Image: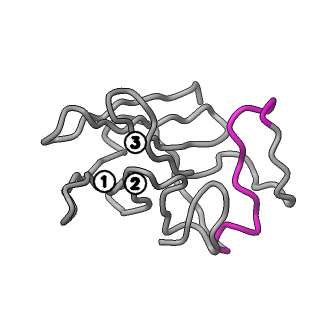
């Protein structure tokens, strides 16, 4: 699969957008505010999850290691824009919240300042995603 990138603007505040990036190895979502990343979350690995949690910046975006992923999880990767949906909301304190749905199923949440964001696909908190 060639790299995939998608920008989804916030429905009610154009200062915010979500960038979805799948480089053919791993996919991430980034919440931006006027173009600056204010939250990020791992979405899925395309390649087998590594056994160790060693992250090497030279390898590009890191794959989430096996110890952080819920057992038996299989994710159908993004193949088209229609596969990904963002549901935008405003929190009680006025911040933007965004739920990320893949193939119609909730998989992650991004909030300004949450680095990383939360995912239903992880078994324990890690550097790439927190347990939702």
The label number, if any, that marks residue 83 in the structure image: none
Label 3 residue SS: strand
The answer for how far apart the CA atoms under marks 1 and 3 are is 8 Å
Q: Picture quarter containing residue 65?
A: bottom right
**Is disc 1 in contact with disc 2, using a CB cutoff of under 8 Å?**
yes
The answer for how far apart the CA atoms under marks 1 and 2 are is 5 Å
**Is disc 1 in contact with disc 3, using a CB cutoff of under 8 Å?**
yes
What secondary structure is the magenta-colored segment mainly?
loop
Tag 2 or tag 3, which sits nearer the N-term?
Answer: 3
Tag 2 or tag 1, which sits nearer the N-term?
Answer: 1
**Nearest the eye: 36 or 120:** 36
Residue at image coords 31%, 53%: 98
Vertical arrangement, residue 30 with respect to residue 119, above or below: above
Label 1 residue SS: strand
Question: Which residue is the site of mark 2?
Answer: 110
**Nearest the eye: 76 or 113:** 113
Residue at image coords 41%, 35%: 19
The residue carrying pointer 2 sits among few (fewer than 14), some (14 to 19) or many (20 or more) residues within 10 Å by Cα, namely many
Whole-percent x and y of residue 40? 50, 47
Label 2 residue SS: strand
**Is disc 3 in contact with disc 2, using a CB cutoff of under 8 Å?**
yes
Q: On the rendered structure, is 75 left or right of 45?
A: left
The residue carrying pointer 1 sits among few (fewer than 14), some (14 to 19) or many (20 or more) residues within 10 Å by Cα, namely many
Question: Which residue is the site of mark 1?
Answer: 98
Question: Which residue is the site of mark 3?
Answer: 31
Whole-percent x and y of residue 18? 36, 39
Colouring method of the image: one colour
Residue at image coords 61%, 31%: 23
In the image, the segment drawn in magenta is: 57-71
Whole-percent x and y of residue 30? 45, 41
The answer for how far apart the CA atoms under marks 3 and 2 are is 7 Å
């Amino acid at each position: 699969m060639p790299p995939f990138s998608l920008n989804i603007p916030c429905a009610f505040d154009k200062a915010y957008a979500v960038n979805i990036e799948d480089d053919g190895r791993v996919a991430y979502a980034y919440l931006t505010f006027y173009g600056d990343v204010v939250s990020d979350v791992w979405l899925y690995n395309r390649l087998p999850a590594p056994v160790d949690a060693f992250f090497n910046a030279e390898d590009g975006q890191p794959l989430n290691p096996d110890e952080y992923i819920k057992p038996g999880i299989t994710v159908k990767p993004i193949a088209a824009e229609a596969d990904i949906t963002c549901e935008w909301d405003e929190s009680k304190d006025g911040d933007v919240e965004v739920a990320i749905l893949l193939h119609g199923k909730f998989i992650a949440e991004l909030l300004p300042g949450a680095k990383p964001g939360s995912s239903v696909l992880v078994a324990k908190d890690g550097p790439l995603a927190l347990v939702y």
